[in-house]
Amino acid sequence: MSSSDRRPYLTGGLNQTTLDASQDNLVQQLEMVADIQLASGTLRLSDRAKYVDGTFYSPRVVFPAVNRTVGDWLSGELEFSEIQLVVNNTDKEFSDTILPGGSAFAGFIGVPVTISIGLAEDGATYSIIFKGTISDVGGFTRDTSTFTLSARSDFQKANVTIPNQV
């Protein structure tokens, strides 16, 4: 039985060698997390239950697919000007706290949203790919089991260069 650490992202960081090594290994795929700064605290969401540098991210959202396309001038950039997060609230965890009528409800309009992408639980590999605020028009909608947050970029450059090879 081998004792070597088979998680090279813990020591190598997010570089081309690590991306090449993780292409065929689903354990080391790029993962997204969202931080939403509410008045009552930070809402930390992911598409799977995970800890990143000791911080727990609740498995409540499905992120949009991150695709690299060959766009104008063959630039390798990931662009988001708006993002929608559909948050699962089937168990009503947020109904009595952060949602309208709850004890900590302060509204969602203008609340900062940050989306980061990185490798598994190593926080040093995460890079911010979207930074914006929840919009005042259609920024918050709700149904019986989910609520949807629509955030727009804060009008700064929201482009992140993606490596040419994976």
Image (cartoon, rainbow, N blue to C red):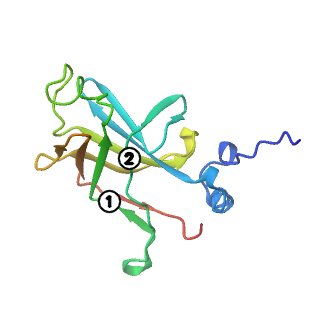
Mark 1 residue crowding within 10 angstroms, few (<14) / some (14–19) / many (20+): some
Residue displayed at 19% across by 43% down: 143
Give residue 111's position: percent from left, percent from top: 22, 37
Question: Closest to the observer: 85 or 36?
Answer: 85
Estimate the x, y position of residue 91 in percent, counting from the top left: 33, 31
Most foreground residue, 1 or 74: 1
Classify residue 102 as left or right of residue 160: left
Residue 150 x/y as whole percent? 22, 49
* Residue ID for mark 2: 115
Q: Which mark is residue 27?
A: none
Residue 120 in the figure: left or right of residue 57: right
Q: Is residue 31 visible?
A: yes
**Residue at x-position 50% and y-position 45%:** 126
Q: Amino acid at mark 1?
A: Phe
Can I make out residue 153 in this image? no
- Classify 70 as above or below 131: below
Q: Kindly state the secondary structure of the residue where label 1 is placed.
A: loop
Q: Is residue 24 above or below residue 8?
A: below
Give the labeled residue for mark 1: 80
Quarter occupied by residue 73:
bottom left
Q: Position of residue 11 (x, y in %)?
A: 69, 43
How far apart marks 2 and 1 lie (CA) works out to 10 Å
User: Which residue lies most toward the bottom here?
Assistant: 73
Q: Who's the residue at 24% across and 46% down the image?
A: 148
CB within 8 Å, label 2 to label 1: yes
- Number of residues whose C-alpha sits closer than 10 Å to that of mark 2, classed few (under 14), some (14–19) or many (20 or more): many
Q: Secondary structure at mark 2?
A: strand
Left or right relative to 69: residue 86 = left
The relative height of residue 115 versus residue 77 in the rendered view (above or below) is: above
